[in-house]
Image (cartoon, rainbow, N blue to C red):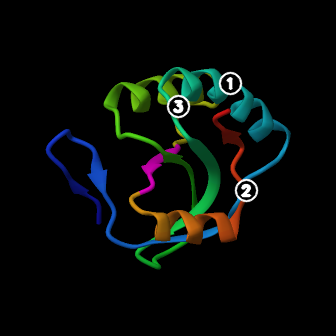
Amino acid sequence: MPVPDRDGLHVQPLIEFVGEQDGPVEQDLKSRFAPVLLSFGVQRAYLAQVRFANEGPHSVAVCIVGAENPQLVHELSAVFKSIFNSNQFLDILFVQSPVQESQLAAACRPFFVAA
């Protein structure tokens, strides 16, 4: 179960990166995310299938290598909601360490890399 931190963001203790989430709709989403990610100085971003605490089916998350920022979360959520209906959701994760990013990179490629 996620634990809220001091900024109201949630910390998930165990994350398994299952694979890349990709398709025509996801390509559109990624292209719409790119300018937002660039404006917030994100280094890399991945759209990954993830499983939390090895429980249940996987979900989809945008995984961000960069500084945690609630405004970035808000703007990415707004982009997502402009494409998908209200009963769908997207997790937004901030990569916590180089080890975690290497686990993520083993499962999928970044869709956004800062120049």
Q: What element carries label 1?
A: helix
Disc on res. 32: 1
Whether residue 16 is situated above or below residue 12 in the rendered picture: below
Q: Work out which residue is located at the far right of the displayed protein and give it.
A: 24
Question: Which mark sits nearer the N-terminus, 3 or 1?
Answer: 1
Identified at 65% across, 28% down, the residue is 34
Q: Viewed as shown, does residue 72 lie left or right of 17?
A: left
Residue type at numbered disc 3: Ser
Find the magenta span and give its range: 90-95
Q: Are marks 2 and 1 in contact (CB under 8 Å)?
A: no
Q: Do the residues labelled 3 and 1 touch (CB within 8 Å)?
A: no
Q: Work out which residue is located at the far bottom of the displayed protein and give it.
A: 54
Distance (Cα) linking label 2 and label 1:
17 Å
Quadrant in which the C terminus appears: top right
- Quick one: label 2, few (<14), some, or many (20+) residues within 10 Å? some
Disc on res. 109: 2
Distance (Cα) linking label 3 and label 1:
18 Å
Question: Nearest the camera: 114 or 21?
Answer: 114
Residue type at numbered disc 2: Arg
Question: Which mark sits nearer the N-terminus, 2 or 1?
Answer: 1
- Depth check, mark 3 against mark 1: the one in front is 1
- Quick one: label 3, few (<14), some, or many (20+) residues within 10 Å? few
Q: Viewed as shown, does residue 74 lie left or right of 51?
A: left
Pointer 3 residue = 86
Q: Position of residue 29 (x, y in %)?
A: 70, 32
Residue type at numbered disc 1: Arg
Quadrant of res 49: bottom right
- Depth check, mark 2 against mark 1: the one in front is 2
Q: Is residue 94 magenta?
A: yes
Q: Work out which residue is located at the far left of the displayed protein and give it.
A: 6
Q: What element carries label 3?
A: loop
